[in-house]
Image (tube, helix red, strand yellow):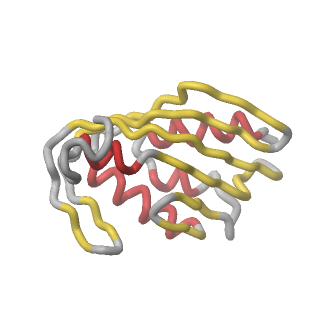
Amino acid sequence: MANAREISDRYSDAINAHDAEAIASLYAERAGLEEPTGTFTGREALIQYWQGFFTALPDVQVQDERKWDTGDTAINEWSATGTNSGPFETPEGTIPPTGKRATLRGCDFLTVHEGLIQSHRAYYDQLSFLAQLGLVPEGTAAS
């Protein structure tokens, strides 16, 4: 059975392959992703989340810059870089594409039991990302 690091590495590979279904298949049936914009529970919600992300950033690639493991949890410090050439669908409405390239930096914690993600928390720098896309006034965040 795959351990937390193996599942975490598969997760990154599936993001880079832009395969929302492969990402969702790494989660237990009732598990989900808790991140700054909300909580996405269940495989269908995860598929929709990632399809939206891949629509907004169709060339996105993630790189795990630092990796740690503790027991059944993999911790990754990562960067995701892509061009915003599609719309971002948000709870507040649609953000049109900016055409700008940006890098989102963050950290996540994936807890795995019996070869599936049971808990996933991600934290990332939304303000810097939005500044790079030109969606917040200059000087609001380091770009």
Residue 140: give x, y in percent of width and height: 28, 47
Q: Examine the image and state in which quarter residue 33 appears.
A: bottom right
State left or right for residue 88 relative to residue 121.
left
Query: On the rendered image, what quadrant is the C terminus found in?
Result: top left
Compared with 13, 44 (above or below) is below
State left or right for residue 74 relative to residue 72.
left
Q: Which residue is at the far top?
A: 65
Q: How many marks?
A: 0
Query: On the rendered image, what quadrant is the N terminus found in?
Result: top right
At 27% from the left edge and 53% from the top edge, which residue is drawn? 56
Residue 7: give x, y in percent of width and height: 68, 41
Which residue is at the front of the view, 108 or 57? 108
At 34% from the left edge and 43% from the top edge, which residue is drawn? 128
Q: Examine the image and state in which quarter residue 65 appears.
A: top right
Residue 42: give x, y in percent of width and height: 59, 69
Q: Examine the image and state in which quarter residue 142 appears.
A: top left
At 36% from the left edge and 54% from the top edge, which residue is drawn? 53
